[in-house]
Image (cartoon, coloured by chain):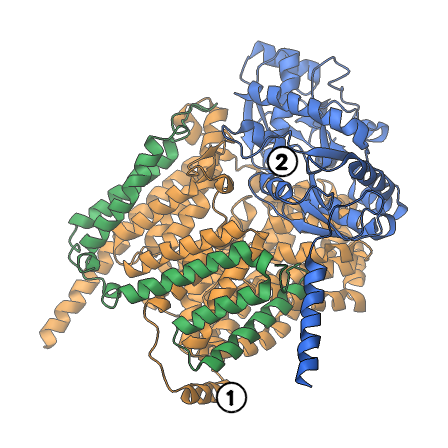
Chain colours: A blue, B green, C orange
Amino acid sequence: MKMTWLKAFLAVVFLICAAATPASDAVAGDFPDKPVTWIVPFKAGGGTDRWARVLSSVSLDVLGQPLRIRNLPGSSAVRGWKYMLEQPADGYTVYQASPTPVIALKREKNPPLKPEQVKIVCFVSAFRNIVLAPPGKPWSTWEGLIKYAKANPGKLTFGATFSELSGTALAFNSAGVKVKLVPYSSTSDAVTDLLGGHIQVAAATESTALTLVPDKAVAILNGTKMPLSEKVSKELGNPPHATALGYKVINFPRWIGVHPDTPDEIVAKLSDKIGEMLKQPSLKKIMGKMGEEIIFVPHKDAQAQYDDIVKGVSEAVAALN
Amino acid sequence: MKLIRTNKGAACAMLAGLFPVLLYILFSDWAGDRLSDGFRLGTFPVIYLLLSMLLIAVTLFDARRGDALEGFETFGLAGLIRVFVYFVVAVLFAFYQEKIGFIPCAFMLVATGAVEMRLRPWTVIFVYASAIALLLFALFYSLGFALKPIGAF
Amino acid sequence: MIDYAALGQAIDIVFQLNTLLWLLVGISVGIGVGAMPGLQASTAVALMLPLTFTMPLGSALGLLIGLYKGAIFGGSISAISFSTPGTPEAAATVFDGYKLMRAGKGRKALLTALYSSITADLASDVLTIMIAPMLAIVALKFGPAERFWVMMLAITLIGSLSGDHLAKGLFSAAFGLFIGTIGTDPIGAISRNTFGLWWLSDGIPFPPMLIGVFAMAMVFNELLNPPMIDAAKDQARKLAENLLKKSEGLSAREFFRCWKEISIGFGVGSFVGLLPGLGATAGAFLSYAVARYASPSKGIGSGKIEGIAAAEAGNNATVGPTLVPLLAFGIPGSATAALIGGALVLQGATPSPRMFELFPHVIYALFIILIVGNIANLGLGRIFAFAYAKIGEVPKQYLIPVIGIMAIVGSYVYEENPYHVLLMLIFGLVGLVFRLCKIPEAPMVITFLLAPLAEENIRRALLIGGGDWVATLMNSPISIALAVLSLGSIVFSARVRVYQRIAEMRASELGDLRE
């Protein structure tokens, strides 16, 4: 009797260990055959987190496996990146981020890793930086702002978060004007100070801009490479687009990446599957409600665009000093 | 330990502890870097650290410098070792619970605490630590934390 | 002023079985989550957010607000029961709460926390809904320079938390300033003072630091001198006996004795909540500090229900006002506001300056749920208070190991970061040194919380003002008034100190005469 109990116990222990041991070399054919760990390097409840949770709501239908979301915030999203690099390069650990860690890594003297240490799976969306000014001021149009800033070099105060600041600094540089850059820790703080008249111009994402235009603010420029959708552009009063003006600016995508040594077939498959997830009607509906735009860029184009962005960020960060 | 039993002694010990930090900042490669608003990266840390050291130095000379600190009366090596052991077990828990598994790690932690708090007999420690470990696991698991009960060796 | 049609619509939304049911679910889960150190209202909300995707407006708001309210009360449960603030907002409750718990008056402490939270919360909700648009305009007047002065004014209050040895209290504050600089420079966005450790580049996170200073320091202190071994049977019998005893409740008279502290909490909390960035934790500590100034003879800090009332009223009174910037401008002023804003967006009622025009029924529904949530919290909270009050009776040999592991697991799950556990343990040692050397912890906590914000704001103000200190700091009547108030607060605290000293001397002289 005792022996049977012992055997049963050992069997259970064995089963638990077997279940917990990672599967050996993954093959693209049956990828994924276990849950995928999805690293969100920001706090729960933020923009990236919401994206990940919405993606996970359709993953079982499309991918055949659930997503295990892990919020690993810290060190400007670099901690989650480091964690991803410490896991096996089998495509089962996925990292979803924004340009925040890239900018942070480019700022640091001794960064703990390089922005190139990732293989880009795809982009799922992108933000635009909308430059906002209060209505009825000499700098309430883009031409007016350039004129005003040229007449008062280095006087016009421009507030935004560090990543919005670095992106828009490129537009100001291209336009040949010098403004005073005031960093904020969140967009809402910057916008509050704009509304209170403590700073003269601010940058915000399009969703924030939409809540303020036209009552409290005027949108005077889309400071990113990507144009606005027709509907949003109209609602914002058709602000000029930096790229159309011939400015050298960058994109701010929401990107998804994996360990740089992950086999290309697995990355391509993951990219296809995410593209398919984004086409699910239920996902489209929730994203539409949240005011998030789906802009899918598959693996083959995303990697090159990402390399471009890293280059652009280096220039933007240099422009800030 | 006799030295630290007064305000004066404690102040000396703390100054000795803070001084290397000051040296670290002053000789670091970042403290002198100038930022876009004109301040240096080390300005605020150095000012605040000097302020702390100044205030602790005040207690070396004020009217209460000789006051006894009762907390140190029963302070001894055995107690320090207990704190150190608990500290180490806790660090091991933090960095290895993902590999070893939550339940054995939590058991170790509660058991260490209970042994050090002189809970006896051993069977009570065993039952108590197991119960707390299982309970905490159940609680966090039900809240959606993907903790591993027993890790993969 | 009040739109009755919209009010009627809002009442319809709120008083539905579904809404009320989800509210109760939210509160129960929230209390459970909040009572775990490291887990906060925002964690609870993030975990349950996917549920709200498909809910109607009333149920979604009910669930989220229930979670939030429950978590706030839950935070004070563990502050009182384990000396471990479950959420940072509850840290100021530890001072008096845990002392009462160990004195066997846990139920009294928990009920004080519950009632004063709810009173202040209700009052601030009503205040907010009545004058939200006006408050919003006042809030906008506060730019970087004005915010800097508010923080200075707050920092001058640490005098009252400094204990009887002022130099030590000020050292504690200066040390808090120093550890607040660890992390990233607010203007340069570059790491500073991180000792070359990449995982410090975000600075020291507040919850693990608080758990270290309050809970771990206590565990370490107990480990230095563990109790002698009793006979095991004896202990077990004692435990069983104590668990059966009913602990002392809170009488209406005792509660009304705290009216002054609750009013202070309401005033301080509402003001602090209105300003972005300060938040509920600052509200709690500042209200606690003001209450100590206001009645030095009450002995707040030595295990008095008045201390709990001040801290809890102070943190809960921030709830209504933090929603003002969200509702008036669509800008979330706090993490809570951001998550409520997120839920509103999902329901198609995007917060914007035109919110009062476009969705008045949503705003009314929101506030009615806030108020109803308070009442529901009262009912559920009483049950939890009864259960947790027993913890004060558990012998230390059983209790300390549990507090230890809760502190460790709590700081780990906060962001699943093992380095946070390491930091928490280090702050446990810092707290132990502070205890042994009789240095008060509260000044360190306050300056650690406020100094980075103050630095960020003054440097931003200087940047905007072109580096002219005088013109920057005296830029508006509000700044000048706040500067004068700060100065006044320093003078006042110095005078209080002198009078106290004189009173002590007189008392000891009288004692001598009697001999």
Disc 2/disc 1 C-alpha distance (Å) = 54 Å
Q: Are marks 2 and 1 on the same chain?
A: no
Q: Does the CB distance between marks 2 and 1 fall below 8 Å?
A: no
On screen, residue C176 versus residue A34, left or right, reads left
Left-right relation of C124 to C433: right
Chain assignment, label 1 = C
The three-letter code of the residue at mark 1 reads Leu
- Which sits in the foreground, C508 or A108? A108
| Position of residue C119 measured from the top left corner of the image (x, y, whole percent) | 56, 65
Please determine whether, in this image, residue C170 is positioned above or below residue B68.
above
In the picture provided, is A77 more to the left or to the right than C169? right
Q: Secondary structure at mark 2?
A: helix
Left or right: residue A22 compared with residue A194 = right
Mark 1 lies on a secondary structure that is: helix
Instruction: State the residue at coordinates (44%, 40%).
Output: C182
- When asked about the image quadrant of residue B40, the answer is top left
Point out residue C245 in the picture as x, y percentages from the top left corner. Answer: 49, 88
Using the image, name the chain to which the residue with label 2 belongs: A
The tag on residue C244 is 1
**Residue C27 position (above or below residue C53):** below
Q: Which residue is mark 2?
A: A187
- Whether A315 is drawn above or below B66: the answer is above
Counting other residues with Cα less than 10 Å from the Cα at mark 2, is it few (<14), some (14-19), or many (20 or more)?
many
Residue drawn at x 74%, y 41% is: C354
Nearest-to-viewer mark from 2 and 1? 1
Residue A79: where, in percent of width, then height?
Answer: 58, 42
| Foreground pick, C293 / C76 | C76
